């Protein structure tokens, strides 16, 4: 017998919200989807009461949450708190992200993620190492003193995670293509960001195995008529995934709408680049000795430099609908199936279908999150 049956509300299956359907889960997996009147028996039935059942959101760039910044705290309790903060907003899978830091902090972060995955902390899928091989000209809030060129031990160091996914953001003009190819050969995903690379350098990096662009448009030169740069190479490419921060601050919505017309929509994914502020009532936190303050929903350091975001995934999906004009199924796909495919987990998460992990959210039409389920367990319920 199935453990839980969800019925009584529209369910997002592929590109369409279907009414009159039901979904059953057991042992952490989706076991059945079909018309409600033919639903199999279950120990517990949840009446959605008209609310939507959606695939859980997957965020590949999470610097922190719940008042905790991953750079400041690398342990299981910290990761549990960060994941729980984002689960309140529908995130069922995430990559805790380290901003460029010391070798000691990076090692501690990798060990903490390994331990969290081993302990079954809900929602931790791996680690994102954003740096330290970035271009200082495009460093953003990454400390200049932490940015370096790769040495001989770097490959083994960056790929030390024993379980889960490892994503590395780098500037290809800093590392060269051989370094990218060696990282990919060791199982890492490589994303290009914080870069001054030319279009030719970017295309060479993609040919070497890079498969993503970290927060496209941000921390890279703009597209121009004689210098297409990384933005031009990204928009001309048909295969790599582009992360977008849709908060109205990082990129003008008009620019994003233009970008969406240039390449396959299923190769765009929403990211939050969230700092400690998500799920926390405090309007500021400290990073690298600076106070980062949120005003009007925008996080900046004292010099006015964008410092990650205060964005959560439910808001990112909401903004993709309201600011980019996307229908709800497409906006949700950019937060679920697209990042799942980028991570190579397209047969595990990001879709509501039999055999997939039962990682789902129950949401109202305004994308308010009422319940979050990870691997068949309810981890959040709106009071």
Image (tube, rainbow, N blue to C red):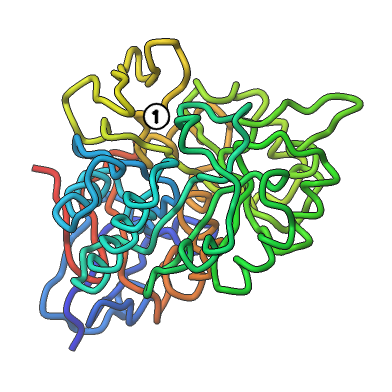
Q: Is residue 342 above or below residue 42?
A: above
For the point 78% across and 51% down, the residue is: 237
Q: In the rendered view of the protein, which quadrant contains the C terminus? A: top left
For the point 44% across and 41% down, the residue is: 100
Apparent side of residue 68 relative to residue 183 in the rendered image (left or right): left
Task: Answer with the quarter of the image where residue 360 lies.
Answer: bottom left
The residue most toward the left is 383
Q: Is residue 245 above or below residue 170?
A: above
Q: What is the x, y in percent for residue 301?
A: 38, 17
Q: In the rendered view of the protein, which quadrant contains the N terminus? A: bottom left
| Pointer 1 residue | 309
For the point 22% across and 45% down, the residue is: 73
Q: Is residue 230 above or below residue 93?
A: above
For the point 46% across and 51% down, the residue is: 129
Q: Is residue 343 above or below residue 91?
A: below
In the image, 96 versus 17, the foreground residue is: 96
Q: What is the x, y in percent for residue 323?
A: 54, 27
Apparent side of residue 246 relative to residue 105 in the rendered image (left or right): right
In the image, 226 versus 155, the foreground residue is: 155
Secondary structure type for disc 1: loop
The residue most toward the bottom is 1
Badge 1 local density, few (<14 within 10 Å), some, or many (20+)? many
The residue most toward the front is 152
Q: What is the x, y in percent for residue 92?
A: 31, 57
Q: What is the x, y in percent for residue 311?
A: 37, 32
In the image, 60 versus 302, the foreground residue is: 302
Apparent side of residue 137 relative to residue 280 in the rendered image (left or right): right
């Amino acid at each position: 017998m199935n453990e839980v049956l969800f019925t009584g509300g529209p369910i997002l299956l592929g590109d369409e919200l279907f009414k009159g359907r039901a979904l059953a889960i057991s042992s952490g997996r989706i076991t059945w989807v079909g018309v409600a009147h033919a639903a199999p028996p279950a120990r517990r039935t949840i009446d959605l009461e008209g609310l939507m059942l959606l695939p859980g959101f997957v965020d590949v760039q999470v610097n922190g949450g719940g008042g905790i910044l991953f750079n400041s705290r690398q342990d299981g309790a910290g990761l549990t708190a960060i994941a729980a903060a984002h689960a309140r907003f529908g995130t069922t899978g995430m990559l805790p992200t380290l901003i460029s830091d010391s070798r000691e902090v990076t090692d501690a972060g990798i060990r903490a993620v390994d331990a969290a995955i081993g302990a079954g902390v809900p929602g931790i899928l791996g680690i994102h190492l954003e740096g330290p091989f970035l271009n200082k000209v495009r460093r953003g809030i990454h400390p200049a003193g932490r940015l370096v060129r790769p040495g001989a031990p770097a490959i083994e160091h960056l790929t030390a995670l024993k379980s889960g996914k490892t994503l590395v953001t780098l500037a290809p003009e800093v590392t060269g293509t051989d370094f990218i190819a060696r990282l990919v050969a060791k199982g890492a995903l490589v994303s290009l960001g914080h870069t001054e690379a030319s279009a030719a350098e970017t295309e060479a990096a993609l040919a070497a195995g890079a498969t993503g662009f970290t927060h496209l448009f941000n921390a890279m030169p703009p597209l121009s008529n004689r210098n297409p740069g990384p933005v031009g190479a990204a928009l001309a490419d048909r295969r790599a995934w582009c992360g977008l921060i849709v908060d109205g601050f990082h990129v003008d919505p008009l620019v994003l709408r233009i970008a969406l017309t240039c390449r396959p929509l299923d190769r765009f994914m929403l990211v939050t680049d969230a700092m400690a502020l998500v799920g926390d009532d405090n309007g500021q936190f400290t990073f690298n000795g600076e106070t980062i303050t949120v005003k009007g929903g925008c996080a900046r350091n004292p010099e006015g430099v964008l410092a990650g975001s205060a964005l959560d995934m439910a808001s990112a999906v909401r903004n993709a609908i309201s600011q980019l004009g996307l229908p709800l199924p497409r906006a949700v796909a950019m937060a679920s199936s697209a990042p799942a495919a980028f991570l190579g987990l397209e047969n595990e998460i990001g879709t509501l279908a039999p055999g997939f992990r039962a990682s789902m959210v129950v949401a109202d039409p305004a994308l308010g999150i009422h319940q979050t389920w990870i691997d068949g367990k309810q981890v959040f319920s709106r009071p």
